[in-house]
Amino acid sequence: MNASHASLGLPMVYLVDDEEVVREALSWLLRSRRLLSEGYGSAEAFEAMLAAQAGGVRGPWPTAPSCLLLDVRMPGTSGLALFERLAERGLLATLPVIFLTGHGDVPTAVAAVKRGAFDFVEKPFSDNALVDRVEQALERSADGIRNRRAREELHRALAELTERERDVMKLVIEGRPNKLIADALNISVRTVEVHRARVFEKMDVKSAVELANLLREHQAL
């Protein structure tokens, strides 16, 4: 397992293809590279798993680096329709999708990549090239999960600020010195200093610039 995944849990590759022989071959291939996988014979079966996860209390899913190998053409709900639903739910950053395509589906897969799919591979595919892309997709998922956790931690920290601390924080971010903040809020400079220090402590930053960058990075400004 990649060391960068260690704190996030074991990576998982989800296989959605209506052909059992394809799922088994992919599962064997992934095991040969020490990657875990779960197979589903339809988009509906995969969505049932997602619904079960959503009904749990473990927080946002996935919690470990994950990616989805998805067949474009399947009976019932197509791979493309499933992909669109995943995109609507905002899952593509933490569950990158690699389409498995036949030759005739390549234009469809290319269009999906433009809409946020990670990649597509054409059957029959090169084993090594496919697993390389899977590992890259898992790295992207790990980054997405870390970013999601950072946003969650940021919002928790913001929720702990008092109303006055929020007022001071807004003016600190604007670059105003303590004297002008004190005048604007009709409080003493010493009180501003105390609130400023508490804001920095709660937000785990050392400077106004670092605070502004943190909020901007996670679109919390």
Image: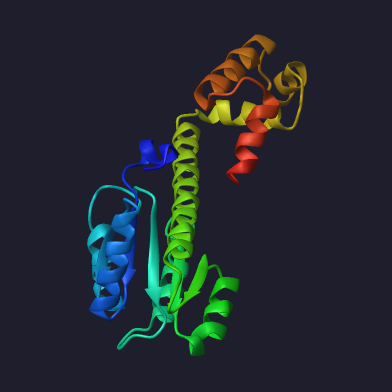
Residue 167, image x, y percentages = 62, 30
Can residue 221 be seen by looking at this rendering? no
Question: Along the horizontal axis of the image, is 170 left or right of 146?
Answer: right
Q: Nearer the viewer, residue 32 or 199?
A: 32
Decide: is 122 above or below 3: below
Q: How many numbered badges does the structure rendering display? A: 0
Residue 6, image x, y percentages = 37, 37
Q: Nearer the viewer, residue 175 or 87?
A: 87
Name the residue rendered at 60%, 72% in the picture. 114
Residue 160, image x, y percentages = 45, 30
Decide: is 44 above or below 30: below
Question: Along the horizontal axis of the image, is 106 left or right of 217?
Answer: left
Name the residue rendered at 74%, 21% in the picture. 183
Can residue 29 be seen by looking at this rendering? yes
Question: Along the horizontal axis of the image, is 193 left or right of 144?
Answer: right
Q: Which of the 4 quarters of the picture holds residue 115?
A: bottom right
Q: How is the image coloured?
A: rainbow
Question: Along the horizontal axis of the image, is 27 left or right of 73?
Answer: left
The quarter of the picture where the N terminus appears is top left
The quarter of the picture where the C terminus appears is top right
Q: Nearer the viewer, residue 192 or 17?
A: 17
Q: Nearer the viewer, residue 196 or 101?
A: 101
Q: Which of the 4 quarters of the picture holds residue 195?
A: top right
Residue 202, image x, y percentages = 50, 24
